[in-house]
Image (spheres, grey):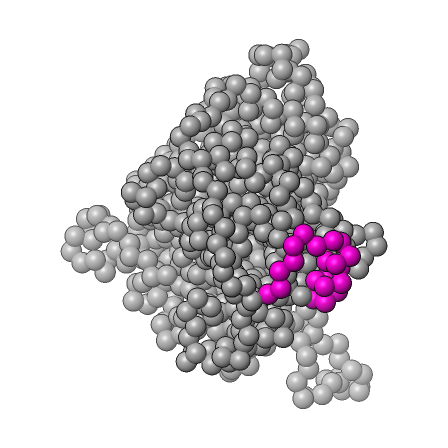
Amino acid sequence: MPLLFTGFNAFGQHECVSGDVDCAAGFSEINAPVSTQNQCTISIGWRYAALALGRKLCLRGLLDDGPNECVTLEATGDIKALSAGDSHCLVLLHSGQLYRVQPKLQAELLVVRLEAPPQTNQGTKRSIFGVPKAPQSPIIEHIACGSHINVAISSENSVYSIPSCLHQFSERQFRVKQLQCGHEHAVLLNVNGDVFTWGNGLRGQLGQAVLKVEETPELLEALAGIKITQIAAGGWHSAAISAFGDLYTWGLNCSGQLGMRVMKPGGFLKEPTVYPLPQLQDLPECGCSQGAESSDDCAPLRVFAGSRHTLLIRRCGRPWASGWCKHGQLGKQLHNLSYVDAFQSLDGIIMNTSSDDVFCGPWSTLLYLKG
Amino acid sequence: MDSTFLELTKLLPRWVDIENVIQGEVEARYILKRATGYIENFQSRGDSGEEETRYLICALVDRNWERIHTGHFSRVPLNTRKIYAIGCYFKICFLLLESSSPAQKELCSGILDEAQLLGCMEDWSELKVALMDYLDKGRSEDSGNLPILESLKRISCTCDIPQLEAPSLQEFQTKCFQAGQPTLLLNTIQHWPALHKWLDLNYLLQVAGNRTVPIEIGSNYASDEWSQQLVRIRDFLRRQFGGDRSKSPQDIEYLAQHELFSQIPALKGDISIPDYCSISKEDPPGAVDIKAWLGPAGTISPMHYDPKHNLLCQVFGSKRIILAAPEDTENLYPHESEFLANTSQIDVSQLDLETYPLVEKVKFYHLLLQPGDCLYMPPKWWHYVRSEAPSFSVSFWWE
């Protein structure tokens, strides 16, 4: 069950197996006690990485004074999700309780108290003795954070800008499928295939024609009517894949993270760097053996994003990527380039599209091959 | 290792100087501790850890570039911009340790300019000046390649606003400033050396060629095709004014709204702040923002307004200008977006009354700004500006 890593690791956020053995596509295998027995989840911050196994949480990297610092904590229950931000890491338990922990050697898990959503007209609940019941803390199901944004969503579809409730999705059928945050924006996908965005959209990251700050979730009109199955939020960009196997990207393209050309022909002047509306990306022929039979076999299936790079997995299992690669975030093979501005394949890796996972750090990519 | 460079390393921030800047900044503390330690001791020991420290410094610069580009620039903590500038100084130093080839020096002077544009360098201005001297030294621009522009013959044409011949301060105060009256001021900057010196573009190349500046690409900033980037003045001048420009049509690049004169003090000596800018409701008068506007024929600033008093002085070339009063704001259809709220959606050079019927009510004022002229615009007056020839203007904004 290898974990294959590439990218920024100057603080020993990830412990490489036996020196620096490079695997396919310029990734290195890292040491982590993962197994099929316990559920493992990972989130990568800029100066530390957080890894959870069961109820155990481990933070590694630059925590206080130097590289390779490590601290291990134990939560009160099994950990479901992590989101590693700059000043804290959000920790969500399967029970729906939310904690945060600061990335330092004296780390401790602190309960995150969320403000109650505005009461509906049910009135104050009372116990059988007539004492007002303390409002139950919400059961959180999804978390995500960036340097300027922290989001949690409850089982009742209350959206929190931690700690306050900023929106309530009231449709009965509404179910959140995916929540992702960039540095300062959030992207939400529901099971119906609708995309909602909010936060700072001044670099086009919200997919709305007008560049502005949006306080509450807004339906992404440009994709309305298209069933979206996967989303990703990068630093200042976003991506979505439709049920038809189309890839859309929007937001900032300063390093080719949208898969679009950065410089005009001639190489002196830049193309526009902000694309406020979703751009349909025409991917190159995959060129793998499966694609020879039908191009549908190589349609993009899943998408992930770091601060300035985007990684997608095509149906055939081949990972493709575009964007900033100066710190090796797209594999060390490209280390003499600073960016790639068209999607290209990371040769030598085939992923199992149903079981394998990808975790993008701001400047790194981690493949979790379970198969 | 040349001795000038060794002197430069002595000007680099020391650990004690920056400790307070990086309080609570875990990564900056670790990386800058290593970098300052390395520089303070590097003559007494080998190059152990040089490559790793250089990489960490580059990562710190990239990291703080990202932080500076997150959220509104105005709300970025000053310390983040200070750390970025300090990081850039060390990055330059480590790059020069690696090599001092002309190409490396050119790379370094680009980093220094970027540090000035994004970072906060005020605590280390001595180092900035010394580094800039060191990096520019020994460079010589191939001159003679750029044209010497001919001074334009003055055209007499209608002007829809009052014109005053070198008004006194008193006259300016009552007739323009207090009256809120846009006015064309004639013969007020005749003494500027810039008026004849800058016509020789090779002079600008010599003085400023190696500096990196932000330019706008595309004819106007409100269009979708517009973008902005950092380029060297040398390359910008060659592309936009070089001899073969007429042969191949290309993108219009505009050095617009840039504080060029704080970046290149030598050019500031060629102009002077008009006395009119000292007239202010504030006491004492606030600072004057001086901005440069340099581009070929055909640059367009779409109809927009600025919040301050504005004196637009024409050094060479001419500009077609259309004004409208603040009272007409609602008839000018400002953009909805936060970025462009001070910009009109209409193209005043081609009015579209069907889409924007209210425009018919607007009273427009037309004029031609010629070399040596100054246009005074009160705050919030709408203006559209198009260059008719290669043009250099200097604007002064004050409260």
Using the image as rendered, state which of residue B219 and residue A277 is in the foreground: B219
Vertical position of residue B13 compared to residue A274: above or below: above
For image coordinates 41% across by 80% down, the residue present is B354
Vertical placement of residue B102 versus A271, above or below: above
Q: Is residue B63 left or right of residue A126?
A: left
Q: Nearer the viewer, residue A116 or A36?
A: A116
Residue A14 shows in this picture: no
List x then y, in percent, for residue A173. 47, 80
Residue B84 in percent (x, y) is at 63, 38
Corner quadrant of residue A246: bottom left
**Quarter placement of the C terminus of chain B:** bottom right
Location of residue A353 with respect to B209 vertically, above or below = below
Instruction: Answer whether residue B136 is visible to the viewer in this image.
Output: yes
Q: Is residue B227 inside the magenta stretch?
A: no
Question: Which residue is painted at 55% across and 30% down in the image?
Answer: B207
Query: How many badges with numbers are in the image?
Result: 0
Q: Residue at x 59, y 12 (%)?
A: B2
Which residues are drawn in magenta? B161-180
Q: Residue furthest right?
A: B283
Residue plotted at (58% across, 33% down): B112
Q: Is residue A85 left or right of residue A123?
A: left
